[in-house]
Amino acid sequence: MVILGIETSCDETAAAVVQDGSRVLSNMVYSQIAHHRPYGGVVPGIASRSHVEVLPRILEDAIKKSGVDWDQLDAVAVTRGPGLASSLLVGLAAAKALAYRLGKPMIGVNHLQAHLHSVFLGDDAPSPEEMLPAIALLVSGGHSCLVRVESQGSFQLLGQTLDDAAGEALDKGASLMDLGYPGGPVIEKTAQGGNATFVDFPRGLKTRGKQGDGPDRSLCFSFSGLKTSLRYFLENNPDALEGDGVRDVAASYQEAVVDSLVSKLELALANADVQNFLCVGGVARNTLLRDRLAALAEKCGKKLWLAAPDYCTDNAAMVAAFACHCAPDETVDWQGMDVEPNLSVEST
Ligand code: KG4
Ligand code: ZN
């Protein structure tokens, strides 16, 4: 089965062609970072206009590079949520038009489930049978959550951020330190060789126990206190970023984010009867996080699976690959499908 995937949920315009659920024939990504950089974050109006402008060329490139003709496609898959409504609409409209014209089905995909599927992409990737059930840490610019992936298509939310996502915390931290955008890569670069114990930034939500019907707070994240703590630190120490100081502050901030993520994951693993865990999403590109996860795997004797760096940040290969496992459902009214900006990780 050959599927064309389309991804426009946030600030990447992406199209990819994937064969039989794991062979990536093409993977085109246009990053809008340069358009949003002057504003220090994603501007929804700019994002959707840029998707409208760029998507046709990206689609042509993805088909051309794949070596497959339009009429050889078996289905068109597209992210339908969660994400920015006006950006999701661009991808959904394009996918519907293409599927209609080709006389093939369209498959709406949950962006978070596609991220969770990204570990199965690439030459050395495991098969789902090898890896599931597993506990997954999904960390991106818009989401941070712990998910139990029981089998393909079966997801249980264990914990999530109560405020900022991990990537958002890095983006906001970088902005406070005037390092640029996006914050994750720039903080990682600035922190190289820095002293990670220079500032003892707080780790959010150390408390245990459930509150109401929501997930167990001991498995939830909170990064808003960390960001505020950085702001106060910089106000009280106006020279802190001078010279090598910026390395130390960036390293301490990165340490606090990574430490919070890894300690909650460790707790989730201690309570779960699984032998595997995985990490996906844009923040999973971070080297410190990848190293700490490898150390955790050694400590708890479980197997770690990481998405390949190119498949961590938003891409359409993960959308097309995941769609292959959903298989086109004849009963789904895809022509009437709408975007779902707040879709949860558990929903199809
Ligand atoms: O998955 P993604 O491309 O988009 C969303 O679905 O949100 O993730 C983007 C996020 C941004 O917040 C960015 O700062 C972060 O991933 N990121 C990183 C790194 N590369 C990207 N964070 C830490 N270290 C990195 N190397
Ligand atoms: Zn994403």
Image (spheres, rainbow, N blue to C red):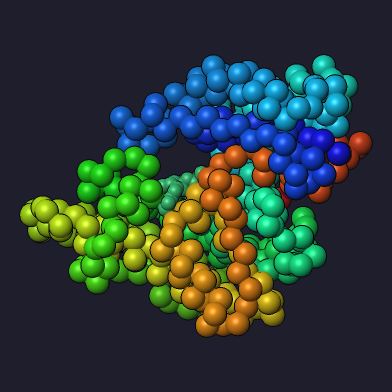
Q: Count the numbered circles shown.
A: 0
Q: In this view, does 307 lie to the left or right of 178?
A: right
Work out whether residue 199 can be spotted: yes
Q: Give the residue at x 62% y 64%.
A: 305
Q: Give the residue at x 71% y 41%.
A: 24
Work out whether residue 105 can be spotted: no
Q: Give the residue at x 44% y 23%.
A: 46
Which quadrant of the view contains residue 225? bottom left
Q: Where is residue 135 in the image (x, y as percent from the top left)?
A: 64, 68
Q: Where is residue 23 in the image (x, y as percent from the top left)?
A: 75, 44
Q: Give the residue at x 80% y 65%.
A: 129
Q: Above or below — where is 193 with respect to 66?
A: below
Out of 305 and 43, give the one closest to the viewer.
305
Q: Position of residue 169 (x, y in %)?
A: 37, 53
Q: Above or below — where is 20 with respect to 131?
A: above
Q: Above or below — where is 147 with respect to 274?
A: above
Q: Is residue 174 left or right of residue 95?
A: left
Out of 180 and 176, give the one closest to the viewer.
180
Which quadrant of the view contains residue 56? top right
Residue lying farthest to the right in this orientation? 330
Q: Is residue 119 left or right of residue 42?
A: right
Q: Above or below — where is 282 with respect to 128?
A: above
Q: Where is residue 66 in the image (x, y as percent from the top left)?
A: 72, 30
Q: Is residue 127 left or right of residue 113?
A: right
Out of 205 and 96, give the one closest to the viewer.
96
Which quadrant of the view contains residue 321? top right
Q: In which quarter of the image is the N terminus?
A: top right
